[in-house]
Amino acid sequence: MLSCGLLLVVGSACSSSGGGAQKQPTTTVKRRPTTTHKARPTTPTTTGTTAPAGPRLTDLILSDGPPGYVRQADDVGDTGPTNLDKAANDDNCSDAREALLSSGFNAGYQRLWTSVDDTGVSLNQDYLFLYRFNSPQGAQAYVQHWHVCLLANQSSKAPIQPFAPPLIPDAVGVSAISEKQGSTGVVLFQKGPYAVQALVVGGPGVDQSGTAADIAYAQYQQLP
């Protein structure tokens, strides 16, 4: 981000441009530049997978973010429909494509919200990654992959601290706080065939775990 979407302390990634949103500097977040992404089709592809029956991801992912946050257009943070190639590119680990295929990746969707101050400068960015797999076991395997990537890519200047997200069974929470370069909170969970990553990036010296847990729980409630 992992985001890793995955602007990750966790293995996903994100960027922003236009729309008045400005990316916060932080040593805990790593993402490949979105300019390196190949243009993705308007309809997500599912190389090597069979789509399970179910609602469209655009109907399952949250529409509204936390109070005070504004949803951004897909061209601001390179969000929207996510196919296999984009999901692999957004992951911060070298074995991302293999992990996605072995887990049975089917399709994904990403969304971005930002909060701004009175001058229009971005304060916090909230990214949400919703990936569907061919089985609950595959979704859980990819959540574990996200977690491993997060731990492997942590910064010595802002060590990752675990926390327990409330109300979501078996969810994983981590935060990283730098007093100079920014802060990050991440919640990962699996529900049925869905893997979710809620990622919050903001200014220095702020515990982002509460905001990440709130948006994760809202998404958890919305999934079937």
Image (cartoon, rainbow, N blue to C red):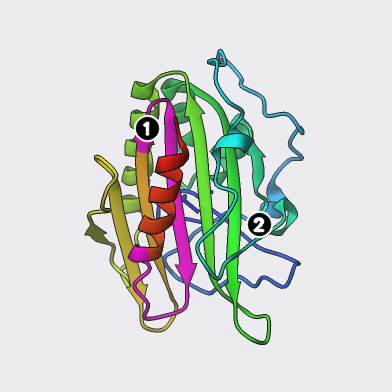
Could you say where residue 18 lies in the image, as x and y percent from the top left? 76, 67
Quadrant, the C terminus: top left
Label 2 belongs to which residue? 77
Q: Amino acid at mark 2?
A: Gly
**Residue drawn at point x = 50 percent, y = 62 percent:** 66
Q: Amino acid at mark 1?
A: Lys
Q: Is residue 102 left or right of residue 106?
A: left
Could you say where residue 117 lies in the image, as x and y percent from the top left? 60, 83
Could you say where residue 56 lies in the image, as x and y percent from the top left? 61, 28
Could you say where residue 90 lies in the image, as x and y percent from the top left? 55, 45
Label 1 belongs to which residue? 191
Which numbered disc, 1 or 2, marks the residue that appears first in the sequence?
A: 2
**Residue drawn at point x = 75 percent, y = 67 percent:** 19
Bin the neighbour count of mark 2 within 10 Å (Cα to Cα): few under 14, some 14-19, many 20 and up.
Answer: many
Q: Residue lying at the far top in this picture: please name it.
A: 50
Q: Is residue 222 left or right of residue 20?
A: left
Can residue 97 be seen in this snapshot?
A: no
Q: What stretch of residues is rendered in magenta?
A: 190-210
Seen from the viewer's position, the closer of residues 1 and 137 is 137
Query: Does residue 203 show up magenta in the picture?
Result: yes
**Residue drawn at point x = 26 percent, y = 52 percent:** 166
The kind of secondary structure element at disc 2 is helix
The kind of secondary structure element at disc 1 is strand
Q: Nearer the viewer, mark 1 or mark 2?
A: 1
**On screen, 194 above or below 178?**
above
Bin the neighbour count of mark 1 within 10 Å (Cα to Cα): few under 14, some 14-19, many 20 and up.
Answer: many
Can residue 139 be seen in this snapshot?
A: yes
**On screen, 33 above or below 28?**
above
Q: Is residue 75 left or right of residue 187?
A: right
